[in-house]
Image (cartoon, rainbow, N blue to C red):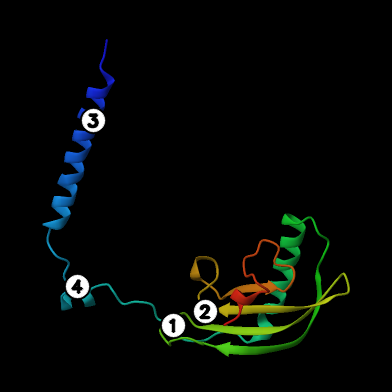
Amino acid sequence: MRNLFNSRNKLGRKLGLGAALVVGLLAFGGTAQAANPLEMNFWLSGPRYDGNVAPCEKALTVISTQFQEKEATFWNSPLVITGFNGIHETAFRPWQSDNIPRRYCTGEAMLSDGKVRKVHYSIIEDGGFASINQGVEWCVAGLDRNWTYNPSCKAARP
């Protein structure tokens, strides 16, 4: 008959020795050093943003199309955006200049159910598919059903 208590102790000792070996290698390994000037300037050009972001009105057709597609596909809803009103910019590059340029906008969207809801969105330079075009992130207040930008589209604003 096999003694299970002794076999477990042997396994524990093997694991303990392995963990001690890993910790020892990490503790006595070489220290990290900064890149030298050649490493810093060789193929590491970094992102180049022009700050050419479309005005707020250019994103409205994209928002309407994506809203209708999302409502029909995921929520089985016939809601569509029938019009916009009071579209205005709320911020442009609100953070440091090294960040990806974004234009934040807000306004009102008239829906097919007759309700007027706030819409908040941002236009992002190189934010489209494969960073080819400008991308748009948007949120219609009260219809953020998957809570992407909740509470009340706060995460879609600057």
Q: CA distance from mark 3 to mark 2?
A: 56 Å
- Helix, strand or loop status at disc 4: helix
Q: CA distance from mark 1 to mark 3?
A: 56 Å
Residue position for label 3: 11
Q: Amino acid at mark 4?
A: Glu
Q: Residue furthest right?
A: 114
CB-based contact (under 8 Å), mark 3 and mark 2? no
Query: Is 43 or 85 nearer to us in this picture?
Result: 85
Image height check: is 31 above or below 24? below
Disc tally is 4
Tell which circle, 4 or 1, labels the residue nearer the N-terminal end.
4
Q: Amino acid at mark 1?
A: Tyr
Q: CA distance from mark 3 to mark 4?
A: 45 Å
Image height check: is 2 above or below 139? above
Query: Is 60 or 115 nearer to us in this picture?
Result: 115
CB-based contact (under 8 Å), mark 4 and mark 2? no
Q: Residue 142, position in %: x, y? A: 74, 71
Residue beneath the point at 59% across and 79% down: 123
Q: CA distance from mark 4 to mark 1?
A: 23 Å
Residue position for label 4: 39
| On-image quarter of the C terminus | bottom right
Tell which circle, 1 or 3, labels the residue nearer the N-terminal end.
3
Residue position for label 1: 49
Query: Is 151 or 146 nearer to us in this picture?
Result: 151
- For label 1, count other residues whose C-alpha is less than 10 Å away and answer few (under 14), some (14-19) or many (20+): few
In the image, which disc is placed on residue 125? 2
CB-based contact (under 8 Å), mark 4 and mark 1? no
